[in-house]
Image: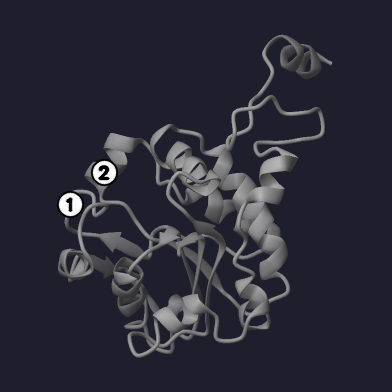
């Protein structure tokens, strides 16, 4: 009752278009949900996300839920999640994507969900890892443990937004490490991040995870540039 009254006087806005949410809507309005460009990677064999990593690192599956376009709804969602503290966006996307992941045969035996880590200095600046709520929603929905202690970012680097592909590749070299004991041997890791761009960061993280004996790797992200 109190929540209904609160929403009446202080209605919540859609994270995508800022219009007021209806009573049955959460975080993202129905209109935005229909307008968001979906990749359908879960239904496509050898999809474009998987192709991006061919010849770079061995993976079981790779995919993203949305396409990321400049000035589009997805950019607005990711920006608010990453820089404005709207962590509920990650939760909403995580539950949305979990419904697809449940139908991807390559992901049925995933043992751990592993986020791309932030350096401790960046984490202190931002206050949170933008993929944490996404990962925890996936974890809760798929009953797969979320582990943010395996991968460590050892070097603090400035944002890669304006770097070219070569520049990004140079930045991510040797900036990650792992802490893994025998309990993580022979496991299937699902590496997660917000947006697949060049794939350099994900590749660097994947290489570290694959150093664990018997490790297998899959990758899912909220979005992918097109």
Local packing at callout 1 (Cα closer than 10 Å; few below 14, some 14-19, many 20+) is few
Local packing at callout 2 (Cα closer than 10 Å; few below 14, some 14-19, many 20+) is some
Is 154 in front, or is 3?
A: 3
Mark 2 element type: helix
Q: Which residue is mark 2?
A: 122
Is the residue 131 above or below the residue 65 in the image?
above
- Residue 152 seen by the camera: yes
**Which residue is at the far right?**
1
Residue 31 occupies quadrant = top right
Relative horizontal placement of residue 79, taking residue 11 as reference (left or right): left
Is 54 in front, or is 68?
A: 68
Relative horizontal placement of residue 180, taking residue 154 as reference (left or right): right
- Residue 217 seen by the camera: no
Q: Residue at x 46, y 84 (%)?
A: 59
Is 64 in front, or is 6?
A: 64
Residue 58 % position (x, y)? 41, 88
Of the image marks 1 and 2, the number of the one nearer the N terminus: 2
Residue 173 % position (x, y)? 18, 71
**Residue contact at pointers 1 and 2, CB within 8 angstroms:** yes
Residue 172 occupies quadrant = bottom left
Mark 1 element type: loop
Q: Residue at x 24, y 54 (%)?
A: 160
Marks 1 and 2 sit apart, C-alpha to C-alpha, by 7 Å
Q: Residue at x 73, y 74 (%)?
A: 103
Q: Which residue is mark 1?
A: 156
Q: Which mark is residue 205?
A: none
Residue 76 % position (x, y)? 49, 40
Is the residue 66 above or below the residue 209 in the image?
above
Residue 52 occupies quadrant = bottom left
Quadrant assignment for the N terminus = top right
Quadrant assignment for the C terminus = bottom left
């Amino acid at each position: 009752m109190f929540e209904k009254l609160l929403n009446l006087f202080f209605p919540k806005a859609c994270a995508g278009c800022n219009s007021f949410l209806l009573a049955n809507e959460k975080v993202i309005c129905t209109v935005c949900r229909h307008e968001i460009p979906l990749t359908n990677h879960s239904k496509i064999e050898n999809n474009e996300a998987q192709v991006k990593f061919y010849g770079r690192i061995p993976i079981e599956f790779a995919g993203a839920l949305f396409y990321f376009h400049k000035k589009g709804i997805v950019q607005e969602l990711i920006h608010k999640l990453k820089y404005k503290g709207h962590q509920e966006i990650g939760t909403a996307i995580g539950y949305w994507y979990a419904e697809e992941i449940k139908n991807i045969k390559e992901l049925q035996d995933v043992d751990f969900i592993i986020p791309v880590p932030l350096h401790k200095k960046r984490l202190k600046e931002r206050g949170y890892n933008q993929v944490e709520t996404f990962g925890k929603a996936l974890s809760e929905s798929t009953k797969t443990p979320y582990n943010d202690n395996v991968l460590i970012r050892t070097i603090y680097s400035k944002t890669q937004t304006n770097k070219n592909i070569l520049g990004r590749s140079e930045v991510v070299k040797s900036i990650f490490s792992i802490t893994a004991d025998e309990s993580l041997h022979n496991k299937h890791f699902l590496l997660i991040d917000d947006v697949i761009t060049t794939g350099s960061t994900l590749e660097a993280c994947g290489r570290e995870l694959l150093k664990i004996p018997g490790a297998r790797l899959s990758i899912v992200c909220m979005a992918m540039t097109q």
